[in-house]
Each structure stands twice: as structure tokens, then as C-alpha cells.
Image (spheres, rainbow, N blue to C red):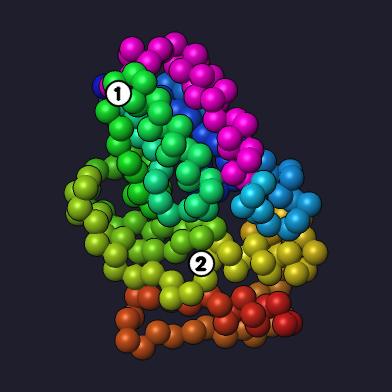
């Protein structure tokens, strides 16, 4: 089975053809990162406009690299949430139109489930397992009971770890995205130089919070 996957939840337009859920036949990405660097973060309007400009070409290139046509595709999968609404609409509407025009089944994919499922491409792992989901907008601990059965064990109550790192890096004048810049600098840092708060969530022992830590770093 070959599935055409389309992703447009943030600032990168991506399309890929995957065979039998684990073999990647193509992976094409168009990014607007350099434009967002000018503003120190993703600008939703710019992101959605670049998706609209790029998505057709990205999908065509993904099919070409996989040496496929739409006649070879058994289903179209597209990210429907969560993400930037304007960016998501571009991907979803394009996928709906393509599915309608070709008679191909359309499968909506939850963004975080997609993060978890990416493990099946990079390893031979099979459920059940415990997964730590860390991205710019999300931080979750998820019990993956089966390929379709998930239970959230813990999550951030406010900011995600990635957001906290990016905004702290921006305040310190580091290149966007700040999280990567901080990661590169961290081996030469002094972990005892400052004392920052470690928030405790008393009513949910596996939940966490990054907003206070982010504010403390920015103020420092």
C-alpha cells in the first residue's frame, strides 16, 4: 500500500510517499524559515501564503521522486490539527481537492499522532510503548497502547518546552530558532551559574509547566 502524506501545520510544506507504513519512497520539503527569521518567529500569514505557493509543486515532486502517479496511490493522508489554522487550511483543502479529483480515499491525521507514528519509520518499534512528544508547540507523555489507541499520561499546563527555548533564545539575541541555538551553546555553559524555578504540579504528578521558567530566564 502506498500513501501520499501532506503536512502544512506550521512553516514547512511537506509531502511524502510511504509504502506499507514504514518505507519512505520520497520526502520533499519547502520551508519559509528564512523569512520568519526576520521576525524572530513564525508569522502565520507569511506561512500560509508560502504553503499556497509551494504545495502543488511539493506534491508533484514527491510523486516524481517515488516514481509514482496518483494511479499508484491507495490513500491520501493530511494533517488536519493542531497547528496554524491558515496553514492547515491550505494542506487540507489541497488534499480534499486532490482526493475528489482522483477518487482516492482521504485520511485526516492528528499532528501529534503523526509525531508518534514517525517512530515506525525510523525503527522497528511496535506498540505498546511510552512516548515523549516534544515539539515547538507541544510537550506530552503518551501511552501508546496500540497503533490507534493512545492515552495521555502527562502534558504541559501552559507553554511547550520548544516555545520556552525559542523565546528565551530570541530574548538573548540568538539566531532563530532559539532552541537550536541554545542547544549548540549549552555544552560550553555553566549549569550552576543561575538558579531557575522548577514548577511542581500537585494535582497531576506527570504534568509540567514551562511558562514560569521561560519568564525567569527572560527576566534574568
Image position of 44 with respect to 52: above or below: below
Image position of 3 with respect to 204: above or below: above
Binning the other alpha carbons within 10 Å of mark 1 as few (below 14), some (14 to 19) or many (20 upward) gives some
Residue for badge 1? 104
Q: In this view, does 199 lie to the left or right of 144?
A: right
The number of numbered badges drawn on the structure is: 2
Measured as percent of width and height from the top left, residue 119 is found at 37, 43
Q: Is residue 108 left or right of residue 187?
A: left
User: What residue do we see at 43% from left, 54% from top?
Assistant: 82
Q: Looking at the image, which is closer to me, 130 or 146?
A: 146
Element assignment for label 1: loop
The mark found on residue 118 in the picture is none
User: What residue do we see at 35% from left, 64% from top?
Assistant: 141
Magenta stretch in the rendered image: 47-74
Quarter of the image with the C terminus in it: bottom right
Measured as percent of width and height from the top left, residue 96 is found at 38, 32
Q: Upstream in the sequence, badge 1 or badge 2?
A: 1
Q: Looking at the image, which is closer to me, 131 or 155?
A: 155
The mark found on residue 160 in the picture is 2
| Residue 48 in view here | yes
Eye-nearest disc, 1 or 2? 1
Amino acid at each position: 500500500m502506498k500513501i501520499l502524506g501532506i503536512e502544512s501545520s506550521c512553516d514547512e510544506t511537506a509531502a511524502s510517499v510511504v509504502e506499507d507504513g514504514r518505507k519512505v519512497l520520497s520526502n520533499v520539503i519547502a520551508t519559509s524559515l528564512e523569512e520568519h527569521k526576520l521576525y524572530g518567529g513564525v508569522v502565520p500569514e507569511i506561512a500560509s501564503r508560502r504553503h499556497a505557493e509551494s504545495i502543488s509543486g511539493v506534491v508533484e515532486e514527491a510523486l516524481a521522486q517515488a516514481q509514482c502517479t496518483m494511479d499508484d496511490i491507495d490513500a491520501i493522508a493530511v494533517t488536519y490539527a493542531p497547528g496554524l489554522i491558515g496553514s492547515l487550511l491550505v494542506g487540507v483543502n489541497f488534499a480534499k481537492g486532490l482526493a475528489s479529483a482522483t477518487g482516492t480515499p482521504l485520511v485526516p491525521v492528528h499532528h501529534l499522532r503523526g509525531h508518534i507514528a514517525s517512530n515506525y519509520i525510523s525503527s522497528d518499534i511496535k506498540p505498546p510503548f511510552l512516548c515523549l512528544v516534544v515539539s515547538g508547540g507541544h510537550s506530552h507523555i503518551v501511552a501508546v497502547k496500540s497503533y490507534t489507541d493512545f492515552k495521555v499520561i502527562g502534558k504541559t499546563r501552559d507553554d511547550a518546552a520548544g516555545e520556552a527555548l525559542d523565546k528565551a533564545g530570541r530574548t538573548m539575541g540568538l539566531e532563530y530558532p532559539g532552541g537550536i541555538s541554545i542547544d549548540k551553546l549549552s555544552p560550553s555553559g555553566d549549569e550552576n551559574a543561575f538558579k531557575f524555578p522548577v514548577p511542581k504540579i500537585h494535582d497531576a504528578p506527570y504534568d509540567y509547566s514551562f511558562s514560569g521558567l521561560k519568564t525567569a530566564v527572560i527576566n534574568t
